Amino acid sequence: MRLLEISGVSAAYGDLKVLHDVSLHVDEGEIVSLVGSNGAGKTMLLRIISGLVPVTEGQITLGGKNLLKVRPYERVSVGLSHIPQGRGTLAKLTVKENLILGAYSLKSSQQREENIERAYGMFPKLRERKNQIAGSLSGGEQQMLAIARALMCDPKIIAMDEPSLGLAPIVVENVFEIIQRVSSERKIAILIVEQNLVQSLSIAHRGYVLENGRIVREGEAKALLEDKDIRSAYLGI
């Protein structure tokens, strides 16, 4: 069943048009990768979904609800979590304090302690470091914390911006395994924006390729990963 649907979205920074008639969808419990080179407009699309950038044309619905009529700070209440580029952890607060702030909505605050325990169960390292300042964690641990914090509000979908950014290859592999596990165990849809085409498409069900603000390819993730033109353009092979 369709969960997130983006239809004919265009957007601009001032007079510079960045997205052109973008349409994509994410089904319930599905992992979808949006890949493309730097500057293609991937981050802008996630910022639009979160309400941080306005659209000039198009519609976005989440669970059938018109997301463009929902205020940015209320979108978590309709099931959206956003992990921004750079992870967005609050560096001067502890791990536990970060998790507490992830449950700021009325509904999730009522289940806060239960969800913290659930997060520790999924990420045992965070329990070990619950009183540690988040800024002192390794890059991989900060990404775990960002995912755990996003789960604190019991989302229907998590939008992730470049989860591999700045991480060593072995850590990247672990992070993508975690993303896959979160989706399968919690039945949460995930929209991943990535430059790391191989890793993101390897765990996804479907994918879209964004070039110069336009969707130029879409399909099953495996088929996109094996596409000769895509491999030549993005992997140089």
Image: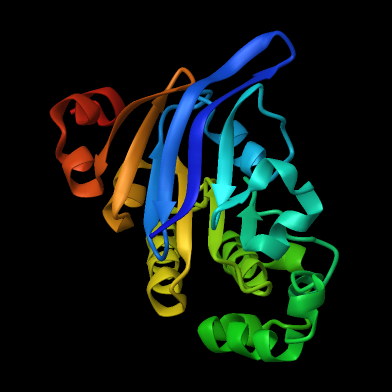
Q: Position of residue 50 (x, y in %)?
A: 68, 46
State the image quarter where residue 214 is shown.
top left
Quadrant position of the C terminus in the picture: top left
Q: Please name the residue shown 41% across and 79% down the image.
A: 185
Q: In the rendered image, is residue 195 in sight? A: no
Q: In the current view of this chain or complex, which residue is farthest to the right?
A: 92
Q: Position of residue 94 (x, y in %)?
A: 80, 74
Relative height, residue 168 to residue 49 (above, below): below
Q: Please name the residue shown 16% across and 33% down the image.
A: 227
Closer to the camera, 58 or 91? 58
Asked if residue 205 lies left or right of residue 83, the reply is left
Asked if residue 94 lies left or right of residue 235, the reply is right
State the image quarter where residue 234 is shown.
top left
Q: Please name the residue shown 60% across and 82% down the image.
A: 119
Closer to the camera, 22 or 208? 22
Which colour assignment does the render follow? rainbow
Relative height, residue 186 to residue 141 (above, below): below
Q: Position of residue 208 (x, y in %)?
A: 35, 37
Relative height, residue 23 to residue 110 (above, below): above
Q: In the rendered image, is residue 106 in sight? A: yes
Q: In the current view of this chain or complex, which residue is farthest to the top?
A: 15
State the image quarter where residue 116 is shown.
bottom right
Asked if residue 185 lies left or right of residue 226, the reply is right
Quadrant position of the N terminus in the picture: bottom left
Number of marks drawn: 0
Q: Position of residue 84 (x, y in %)?
A: 64, 48
